[in-house]
């Protein structure tokens, strides 16, 4: 029974430190910046309009895409999606939100990688971004992109 109690105490200490790490992350500049720009984006009427327009154009493109390049409206629908995407990328609020989101993702990835590799360097660490040092090609196996077979 003493072994079980020791394991429970070790786990509770780990959990307490994990909560403390979570608090540190939540008080970081990256989280503060991310939350600020997320709020700005959610209240920006131009961004809201562009997102709604993007969703409708994307839906139209997906309907055309079912039939591939041979659909008469395929290229037109694709061009419309790309045009709305470009407008979104040119919007300063949207752009700053994406930068803040990427910065926060980098922070979380770095922390996750540090923790995982302190246990073993063979542990795979998930990321939203393809890491250049991981040996992945652009695209992914599941989406039909070019797969090198080295993705984690």
Image: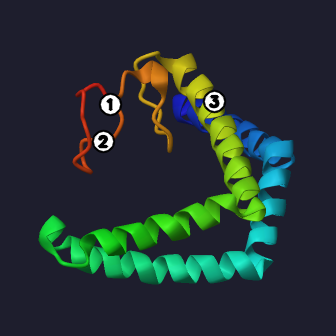
Q: What element carries label 1?
A: loop
Q: Do the residues labelled 2 and 1 touch (CB within 8 Å)?
A: yes
Q: Is mark 2 on a helix, strand or loop?
A: loop
Q: Earlier in the sequence, mark 2 or mark 3?
A: 3
Give the vertical position of 106 relative to 60 (above or below): above
Task: Name the residue carrying label 2.
Answer: 140
Task: Name the residue carrying label 1.
Answer: 151
Q: Which of marks 2 and 1 is nearer the N terminus?
A: 2
Write down the quadrant of residue 91 in the picture: bottom right
Q: Position of residue 148 (x, y in %)?
A: 24, 27
In the rendered view, how is the structure colored?
rainbow
- Say which of marks 1 and 3 sits in front: 1
For the residue carrying disc 2, how many other residues have a C-alpha within 10 Å: few (<14), some (14-19), or many (20+)? some
For the residue carrying disc 1, how many other residues have a C-alpha within 10 Å: few (<14), some (14-19), or many (20+)? some
Task: Name the residue carrying label 3.
Answer: 110
Residues at marks 2 and 1, CA–CA distance in whole angstroms = 8 Å
- Say which of marks 2 and 3 sits in front: 2
């Amino acid at each position: 029974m003493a072994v079980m109690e020791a394991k429970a105490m070790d786990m509770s200490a780990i959990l307490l430190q994990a909560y403390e790490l979570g608090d540190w992350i939540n008080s970081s500049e990256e989280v503060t910046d991310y939350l600020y720009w997320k709020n700005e984006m959610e209240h920006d009427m131009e961004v809201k309009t562009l997102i709604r327009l993007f969703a409708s154009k994307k839906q139209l493109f997906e309907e055309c895409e079912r039939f591939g390049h041979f659909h008469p409206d395929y290229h037109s629908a694709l061009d419309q999606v790309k045009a709305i995407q470009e407008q979104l990328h040119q919007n300063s609020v949207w752009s700053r939100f994406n930068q803040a989101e990427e910065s926060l993702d980098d922070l979380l990835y770095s922390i996750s990688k540090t923790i995982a590799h302190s246990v073993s360097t063979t542990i795979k660490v998930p990321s939203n971004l393809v890491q250049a040092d991981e040996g992945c090609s652009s695209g992914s196996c599941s989406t039909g992109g070019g797969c090198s077979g080295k993705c984690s």
